Amino acid sequence: MNIRPLPLLLAISASLAIPAAQAATTGTLRFAGQINAGTCNLSAKDVNRTITLPTVKVSDFDNISVIGATDFDITAECESDIRNVTFLFTGTPDTLIPAIFASTGTAKGVAVRIRAGTPTEKTVMYAMGTPSQRSRTIATASKQAVLSVEAAYQKNTAPLAQGTVDSTVTISITYS
């Protein structure tokens, strides 16, 4: 078999002269995400809690309308970007004094008064009031907002009779 070298060399040279295929396209990458604000939650001990007021006698109300004040704290645990927490109290108002929270217990002539704020400055939380009359805003410190609260018996205008006092108040929080 006789191979001619010149056509073979020309064929090889021509194949080497053709550039390799190259892409001239570009692409765009888009990055999407979201950054949410932190959250706050009531401390586990404050989610469902019973505050026991001291036992008092009917005669203890002879010269005073509020008695048995009991102090406690309600805590919101927050993430580091939260600066303020608002605690809102909601409950059934007493029919005779709507500013205090009604009792569904067996005692008559008495309801529950709640005051809240800081340890040195507490104001009444009105059972039947505007949101600003039923809430307090507390600044966070060390990722917590601690609301100082005082609950007490308050005599209303009905005749006082012995029995149990039972009042349920819901606390909700908002934060920023």
Image (cartoon, rainbow, N blue to C red):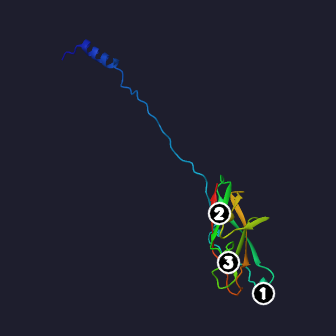
In the rendered structure, find residue 59 and report the number of the disc placed on it.
Answer: 1
Q: In which quarter of the image is the N terminus?
A: top left
Q: Mark 3 points at which residue?
A: 96
Q: Distance between the residues labelled 3 and 2?
A: 21 Å
Q: Of all residues shown, which one is farthest toward the left?
A: 1
The answer to which of marks 1 and 3 sits earlier in the sequence is 1
Kind of residue indicated by mark 1:
Ser
Rendering quarter of residue 95: bottom right
**Label 3 element class:** loop
Kind of residue indicated by mark 2:
Pro
Q: Position of residue 75 (x, y in %)?
A: 68, 64
Q: Of all residues shown, which one is farthest toward the top?
A: 6
Residues under numbered marks 1 and 2 in contact, where contact means CB atoms less than 8 Å apart: no
Q: In this view, does 135 lie above or below 2?
A: below
Marks 3 and 2: which is nearer the front?
3
Q: In this view, does 160 lie above or below 31?
A: below
Circle 3 Cα neighbour tier, 10 Å, few/some/many (<14 / 14–19 / ≥20): some
The answer to which of marks 1 and 2 sits earlier in the sequence is 1
Q: Distance between the residues labelled 1 and 2?
A: 35 Å
Q: Mark 2 points at which residue?
A: 131
